[in-house]
Amino acid sequence: MFKPVYRFIGKPLTLSAFCLAIMASGCQDSLDEQSINPDNMEVDEEFVGYLNGDVIPGQYIVILNEQGITFRKDGTYAEIQEAMKKGATDLLVSHKIGGENLKEVFGASVEGFSVRMSEEEYDRVSQDPRVKYIEEDRMMAVSRPRRRSNRWDNSAPSNTQEVSYGVARVGGHTRYTGDNVAYILDSGIDLEHEDLNVNASRGFNAFTSGSDGESLTDENGHGTHVAGIIGALDNSVGVVGVAAGAPVVPIKVLDANGSGPYSGVIAGIDFVAANGNAGDVANLSLGGPGSNAMDDAVIAAANKGIYFVLAAGNNNNDAENYSPGRVNGQNIYTISAMDSRDRFASFSNYGNPPIDYCAPGVGVNSTWLNNEYRVLSGTSMAAPHVAGIRLLGEINSNGRVRNDPDGNRDVIAVK
């Protein structure tokens, strides 16, 4: 038997897995959240991946002082991208850095780019007056569930529909009839799932090569699960989402292993900032060590009237230490997790600020790959409950979570 194999880049940090797979086939209320341990993750024996927060050696995120692009607010995404690529290339060439080292460019939220540089090149670019700040690019990773086995067969019967305890706790499901969409910044979405209303035409893919670069479809499962909590159809099949039938748009920033660079996540945020409309919702059930660039991108995009719902994280730690969950600002909501008895989840990050609401995140059943369903736990599952509420209208509250470790009990979000 092969042992789990990891490829580490930079100094390994503690894994911050934002969803935990729960092998459960009984009543969800019987799940004991105290038995869930986010530090005891099992991985596919053939999995080669990254620890959350690993530094990508020689890769940086460069944020520029505003360059005064006159069409920044009115120009198309393609126009903004073209202008930023030209500006980034000109800057790099002035420091004798080839354009082939340029990776992502951003212009609709923050203005900047990611790039491969040597230490000497970094020193030169950091002194350029056009540069606001530079930070190391990192890898973001959510957990990859183990390979399928009979213990994972948690598919809902095709002729029944379950209203999960989480959807019921936040006020039940409502058939969505609005004009806005939910952007799912994650591992993609299963484009063919019969229980989801997927709008791939408005999607974005941060990957340009390999199987992940070929399609917006989800090869991990995490993004599909998140999408179902928000908008699974009210169709007598499987499960039903908070805003049932809402269009879910895949913004693919994590690969089949559930990982992707911070720069790719920022590129996804930038795409939403350029293409989203006021009243749309962006769900980010991901996070890692602090990043000013990611935080700034979320704030700028949210200032355009797009609601950002952020998972607080599963580190049993102060949420202020993690991005983007630590972000505060207009139209931004950070969500902690609780179980079916309104008890604070032992794995959930805490702290006020930045946490705004608590929502169900333990033993949540939702959509999975290949028209299947899975029960998962994490603040990844709590956030989309609130994203669904926000898509329907205002977020209200009903009570406060029990056993909040910071002593300031988070309010429970409901419709």
Image (cartoon, rainbow, N blue to C red):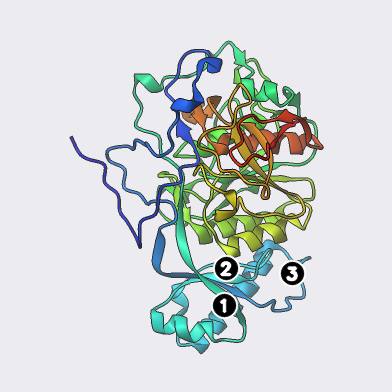
Q: Please say if the residues under marks 2 and 3 sit with CB atoms less than 8 Å apart.
A: no
Q: Nearer the viewer, residue 295 or 344?
A: 344
How far is the residue under mark 2 from the one under mark 3?
Answer: 14 Å
Callout 2 amino acid: Val
Question: Residue 176: x percent and y percent?
Answer: 76, 30
Q: How many marks?
A: 3
Residue 274 seen anywhere in this rendered image of the structure: no
Q: Earlier in the sequence, mark 2 or mark 3?
A: 3
How far is the residue under mark 1 from the one under mark 2?
Answer: 8 Å
Q: Earlier in the sequence, mark 1 or mark 2?
A: 1
**What is the quadrant of residue 108 in the picture?**
bottom right
**What is the quadrant of residue 41 in the picture?**
top left
> Residue 261 bears which disc, if any?
none
Q: Please say if the residues under marks 3 and 1 sit with CB atoms less than 8 Å apart.
A: no
Circle 1: is it few (<14), some (14-19), or many (20+) Cα within 10 Å?
many
Residue 325 seen anywhere in this rendered image of the structure: yes
* Picture layout, residue 273 above or below residue 227: below
Question: Residue 284: x percent and y percent?
Answer: 60, 46
Callout 3 amino acid: Arg
Q: Residue at x 72, y 33 (%)?
A: 413
- Spot the residue most to the front: 407
Tag 3 residue: 72
Tag 2 residue: 105
